[in-house]
Amino acid sequence: MNWEAIGASGDFLSAVAVVVSLVYLAIQVRQARQMFAASAQQQLTDSFQQLMRDVWSNPEVHRIWHLATTTPGKLSEPDRERFGMLLTSLFTEFSNVLQLSRINPAILENYRPGIDRMLGFPAVRAWWKSQSFTFPQDDLFHCYIDSRIQKLESEDVIPSSSLKK
């Protein structure tokens, strides 16, 4: 065997090693991304459960939630403010879900029924209409919520006239 053949074999083996390294790196990146998504999803779930636990376990917060979702006209101004703060927290969670769904679209599918249920309450839609400016207008989340409301309206899940209240 001559030196040229040995050099060519070395170049070939180096190229194979580079390809194997790139494949290994791609697998590692994919696994890290999956682990991040799983961890972030667990944190979102824990945070959302804590928020809901606060609603159900705190009699005062539960009273405000119940009034706002059944007879919003009976809310006092301080209760309306508390309800708004609760919705700000809730919609921030939903915004985080939407951001995470860029990595794992199934996450959004899991939360969509809950988002739609919240948007079914007239008081929640009224809050969104008056407070959506707190989320950037060109933000994906802002557009998503508006599109969900339109879709629910078009499917007659929520009457379009209820949005004007």
Image (cartoon, helix red, strand yellow):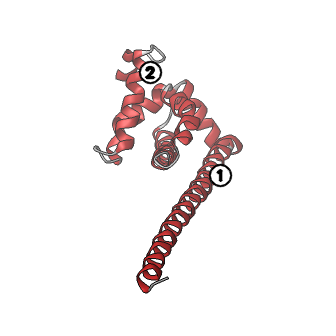
> Residue 6 in the image: x percent, y percent?
47, 82
Please identify the quarter of the rendering in which residue 132 is found.
top left
Helix, strand or loop at label 1? It is helix
Name which residue lies at 45% across and 39% down: 77
State left or right for residue 132 relative to residue 83.
Answer: left
SS for dot 2: helix
Horizontal and vertical percent position of residue 97: 51, 46
Residue most extreme to the right: 57
**What residue is shown with label 2?**
152
In x, y percent, where is residue 13? 50, 74
* Tag 1: amino acid: Asp
> In the current view of this chain or complex, which residue is farthest to the left?
138
Left or right of 11? Residue 32 is right
> Is residue 165 at least partly visible in the picture?
no
State the mark number for residue 25: none
Residue at image location 34% in from the left, 37% down from the top: 143
What amino acid does circle 2 point to? Answer: Leu
* Quadrant for the C terminus in the image: top left
Residue 46, numbered label = 1
The one of 1 and 117 positioned closer to us in this rendering: 1
Task: Tell me residue 73's x, y (percent).
Answer: 47, 26
Q: Between marks 1 and 2, how big is the CA–CA gap?
A: 28 Å
